[in-house]
Image (cartoon, grey):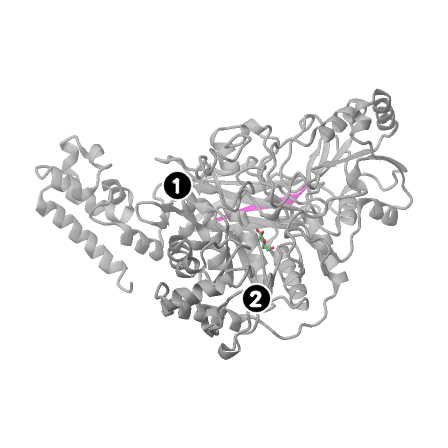
Amino acid sequence: MNHKPIDPIVLVGAAKDFWHTHEVKSYHIPSIHMNDGPHGVRGTNSSAIIATKNKTATCFPTSSALASSWNPDLIYQIGKAIGKEAKAHGIHALLGPGINLKRTPLGGRNFEYYSEDPCLTAECASSFVKGIQINGVAACLKHFILNEQEIERMTINCMVDEKTLFQTYLWPFREVIRKAHPWMVMASYNQVNGDKVSESTYLLTEVLRQQLQFDGVIVSDWGAVENPVEALKAGLDFDMPYMGEYQTETIQKALQNGDLDHEVLEARYKRVKDFSNKLDFSNSQGVNYDQHYELAYQAAVQSIVLLKNDKQLLPLNETTERIGIIGDFFRNPRIQGAGSSKVTPYKQITPEMALRKDYSHIQYSYLNPTQDDLKDDTYVQEIQAFAKNYKTLILFAGLEEMIESEGIDRHTIRLSSYYNQLINIVYEANQDVIIILNNGTAVSFDKMKQVNSMIEAWLPGEAMGEALWAIVFGRENPSGKLSETFPISDLDLPMGPRFKMNETDVVYSEGVLTGYKYYDYLNKPVHFEFGFGLSYSEFKLDNYQLIKKDKRYEISLQITNVSSRKGMEVIQLYMGLDQPSQIYPMKELKRFIKIEVKPNQSRRVAFTVDSADFESYNTNLKDYVVVPGIFNLYIGTSSRRIHFTSQVESIYDEMSIRKTLLGLRENSLCKDFYYYPLTREPFMESFSYLKEEGVFDIILDMPLNLIARLFPDLISKECMDGFLKKVGGLKKQHIKNK
Ligand code: BGC
């Protein structure tokens, strides 16, 4: 037994139990309470993986739903409300938002992530973080990094190339760090290219702190650290949760035997101290849960996506006298996902409760066939007779809770055979059936193409019932747009129906082509594209204008509501390099705006595109720099419904000039100098004679200093020195303050 007292600095940031850190009086650092999660306060004391009986809190739509609202202002309000509730529960750090991207709909935890797109993810998460932190409660970006699947999530090795890592998966972290300054990041369980994330100096210190300039604290995912000393050295601050005395004892021992420098602990002390100074430890005021229910209702309304309305059966008329309803989710809906994000809702209004309460004049009959019923011909006939009997027929379908959950991935994008069969049987009898989907991520089913009315309700939180009927009966106008692509079949998925490549590794083989970027690149048909969603209103887009002003492009257009119903549309701006020399997305989301337009009203929508929008991670220059060339600019109402296209040339502001010049070295490729507008002229002045020699195009792909060494007859020392001097001059001119 070790009776020696633990050095207090060892206890700074050390876990006391499942959710708290130690208070360290001598350093004036209070105990910090961390708790889940992204869709509402989990507020549990339990250490169970899935504790469902917690303190009550507002259960908001899950992130995949919220992102479908395309409304960062609304998400800010939700962050603010959750932060307030967290404070009321005595929580100082809220473990969310989750900003991993969706490589495929098979990810079991997709419901907890915003989107397949880094830009949409970053916009939603930035608002959420700002909302949480305004309360003096820390938001925690998770899970850093490459935790895109649940299968073997604690051990899996994710193999990824540098471009994909920085361009796609680190992008949202970078953006949220820049825009919202989160105080905390959670290091994930997995490995990246053989490096355990929670113990990786490269990922935690070099990438996260130095390259992405994160200045907060890093907490491990629960149990992600194997070697506490290595984790500390790598830059981790909180090794959560408490898993026995060995965590602090190992550190103490390492300190004593010289394996760990005191400076490492002091650096951690400084970070934890700065962090705790930001937190509000005061008692909070009361929470108005009814007001938060209203917010949850608004959020659900704006998140729900109208996918099909071919025969304009929706909205239903409130004078409808009788409705036939089929499916368990009517009575037992899924309002949230399973796992650590699970909230015990303050109140929950199911679709059945809401129909009874708000539409009491409507008669409805309800059928909930079991799996066995579908095997019984007589019962199948009864279902069909029921389906035929109702002109207005609604079928609830979706994913059962244990099909999508933290800790498990899906095996197929298809709905279960039960729901496929049920839909087939009902559709055969009544082709006007309205399908309501209740799931956290994209699904597909046999009759998806054929059905003519369909709503994606997602996992829409505690106000699901009221929000859903408000959309169905037209009290509210749908305005949600898909935050992810709905592919047709498993074989369409970038990696097919499986994540793993072998026993130990997942390979990010689709590279930067995540989600719609992959389907667009291969020109693949999909059920519903990213950014798609219908409205009961009809909008017209015209009067498009593009102006170049100094170092930016100003784009504007007019949207007119040509229907008699007030509605909201999401205008989306995508960009893509016209003639890329490498695999490059045809289009990437860069800007979007959700706008409300009254009947017959016209409004002008404007976007500004600047230098940063032309940036991409450059593996030569090791930085995000402007890509030189011509870009296509697309404006549309989804990633495939493009109304206007123009071409623009990339622009450089001073910052991007500096970054590019910093990255250019003697051993850079000749084409890096040639394509970069600022060095192009000096390059041509020095080397245009190589055109006559007929080798100009060949040398472009070679390192400048190597050609000079290898072919001194082609490039003389004087010529080379002359060119480098000119580049040096440019560097002096632009990087003087660095
Ligand atoms: C999850 C985290 C969560 C933590 C604490 C882990 O298993 O991956 O997202 O915050 O548990 O519940």
Dot 1 amino acid type: Asp
Element assignment for label 2: loop
User: Is 629 covered by the magenta stretch?
Assistant: no
Q: Position of residue 714 (x, y in %)?
A: 11, 37
Binning the other alpha carbons within 10 Å of mark 1 as few (below 14), some (14 to 19) or many (20 upward) gives some
Residue position for label 1: 161
Q: Amino acid at mark 2?
A: Lys
Q: Which mark is residue 16?
A: 2
Mark count: 2
**Left or right of 56: which side holds 131?**
left
Res 200 visible: yes
Q: Main secondary structure of the magenta part?
A: strand
Dot 2 beta carbon under 8 Å from ligand 1: no
- Closer to the camera, 684 or 382? 382
Whether residue 388 is situated above or below residue 274 in the rendered picture: above
Determine the image quadrant of residue 564. top right
Q: Quadrant of the C terminus?
A: bottom left
Q: Earlier in the sequence, mark 2 or mark 1?
A: 2
- What SS does tag 1 mark? loop
Q: Is residue 590 visible?
A: no
- At horizontal 49% and vertical 34% (from top left) the residue drawn is 518
Q: Residue at x 66, y 66 (%)?
A: 84
Q: Position of residue 150 (x, y in %)?
A: 56, 43
Say the numbered circle drawn on residue 188: none
Disc 2 to disc 1, how far (Cα)? 38 Å
Whether residue 31 is situated above or below residue 554 in the rendered picture: below
Q: Left or right of 383: which side holds 159? A: left
The residue that appears at 49% across and 37% down in the rendered structure is: 517
Q: Residue 561 colored magenta?
A: yes
What residue range appears in magenta?
555-562
